[in-house]
Image (spheres, rainbow, N blue to C red):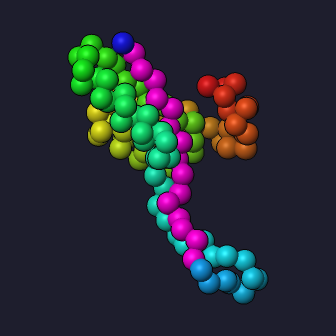
Amino acid sequence: MNILVCLKMVSQARFTDSLNDTGADRLSGGQLVINPADAYALELALRLKDKKSDTFITVLTMAPQYAEHILRTALAMGADRAVHICAVSYTHLRAHETSLHL
């Protein structure tokens, strides 16, 4: 069985209660991680792989170059292959346009 898991990189930043000089909420700096829903999908795929040894898991992301670490994390978790679609022209795409490219 072949499983493809799409991953999105999100920030783990948190809002603080205090306001900045402009009156807007401040966003604390955070690290970039795998979207929790995508991490759950990867975990389910890995559970299937544990039950069926002939399962092959590929993870895919369409993100800037600095998202490479989320693919490395997925490989470390047990994914078999990682695909990184990376191009400057893709950074402005909306969800529907991204889905067409994938």
Q: Quadrant of residue 62?
A: top right
> Residue 14: within the magenta?
yes
Q: Residue furthest right?
A: 22
Q: Left of 88 or right of it: where is 7?
A: left
User: Can I make out residue 9 in this image?
Assistant: yes
Q: Is residue 40 magenta?
A: no
Residue shown at the point (30%, 39%) measured from the top left: 77
The answer to whether 89 is drawn above or below residue 23 in the figure is: above
Q: Quadrant of the image for the N terminus?
A: top left
Residue found at x 49% / y 55%: 32
Residue 71 placement, left or right of 35 = left
Pick the residue in front: 65 or 4.
4
The x, y position of residue 79, in whole percent, is 33, 30
Magenta residues, as a range?
A: 2-16
SS assignment for the magenta stretch, majority:
strand
Q: Is residue 89 visible?
A: no
Q: What x and y, as percent, mark residue 33?
A: 46, 52
Q: Residue furthest bottom?
A: 21
- Which residue appears at 70% of the width and 37% of the height? 95
Question: Does 52 sit above or below residue 80?
Answer: above
Depicted 22 relative to depicted 85: above or below: below
Residue 93 percent across, percent down from the top left: 72, 39
Image coords of residue 40 (percent x, y): 42, 39
Q: What residue is drawn where x is 40% and y is 34%?
A: 42
Q: What is the quadrant of residue 102 in the picture?
A: top right
